[in-house]
Image (spheres, grey):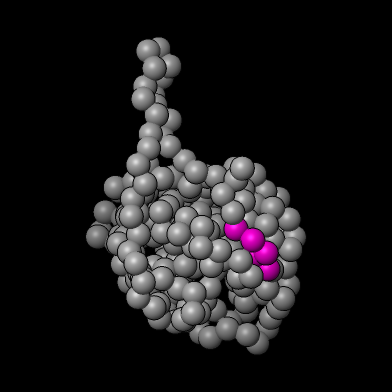
Amino acid sequence: MKRGRVLARIGWLVACASLWLGAAVAQDSAQPLAGGSAPQPGAGPPVSATVKVVLRTSLGDIVLALETERAPVTAANFLRYVDHKRLDGSEFYRAMAVGEDGQYGLIQGGLRGNPKRVLKPIAHEPTTVTGLSHVDGAISMARADPGTATADFFVVIGDLVALDAQSNGDLGYAVFGHVVNGMDVVHVIFGQPRSSTAGVGVMKGQMLAMPVKILTARRAQ
C-alpha cells in the first residue's frame, strides 16, 4: 500500500479504536490554564508555555511537554488525570504500525473507558486552532466523534499529518504536546509483541500481547 493511501486511512483506524474503548462518565469539565512567555527584544518569536509530565512505565520514563498555552483545554484535561493520579496503573495497550516497512505509526494508552476513572469528555481543539501537528513525538487524544475524548491518548512515531484537521472539514485529532525525552522508550513499546487474537475489527493484531504499565504519571519536579 502506498504511503499516501496508508496515511489517509489512519484517521479512520484511530476513530474505530476510540469507539471500541467505551463511554465516559460525567465529571467536572476541563478548565484552561493560563500562562505564556512575553517576547523579549531581539529574542525572536515567543516560546509557548508548557508543563512537563513524566510517565513512568515498566519499560522506562517518557517525559512530555504539554502545550498549556496553545492547547489549553486538552492539556488541562490531561493534567487533571495526572493530578488526580487517575493514570496510575493504566497501560499502553496498542501499537499500530503503518506502511510496508512499519517504521511509523503510534502507540496508544490510557484508561480504556474505565467507568470508575474517566472524567467528562472535553471540547475538541483542532490543529487549525492550536497550530500543532501530528509530527514525530506528538501526543494527541484518541476519540470517536469530536468532543468525545476523555483519557485515552496516543504518541505518534514518524510524521502522520493526515491526522491533522483537513481542508475538507475533517477536524482531525487534538495534539496537545510532544515527547521531550524518552522516544527510545516509545519505540521499545512500539516493538512489543502483538496478540494475534485480541482486538475487534481494525484493532485485531494491534493489541499488545502484554500491555505496558504506566506506573505513575506526575508533573516533573
- Up the image or down, 40 lies above or below 49; here it is above
Q: Residue at image x 36%, y 25%?
A: 38
Instruction: Judge whether residue 143 can be spotted in this image.
Output: no
- Up the image or down, 24 lies above or below 46; here it is below
Place of residue 170 in the rendered image (x, y in percent of width and height, measured from the top left): 29, 62
Q: Is residue 104 left or right of residue 150?
A: right
Looking at the image, the residue that sits furthest to the top is: 42
Q: Quadrant of residue 101?
A: bottom right
Q: Is residue 172 magenta?
A: no
Q: Is residue 95 left or right of residue 134?
A: right
Q: Is residue 162 left or right of residue 101?
A: left
Q: Quadrant of the C terminus?
A: top right
Place of residue 149 in the rendered image (x, y in percent of width and height, measured from the top left): 39, 67
Q: Residue at image x 43%, y 30%?
A: 47
Instruction: Judge whether residue 83 can be spotted in this image.
Output: yes
Q: Residue at image x 65%, y 64%?
A: 214
Q: Residue at image x 46%, y 81%?
A: 115
Place of residue 65 in the rendered image (x, y in percent of width and height, measured from the top left): 52, 44
Chain part drawn in magenta: 213-217
Q: Main secondary structure of the magenta part?
A: strand
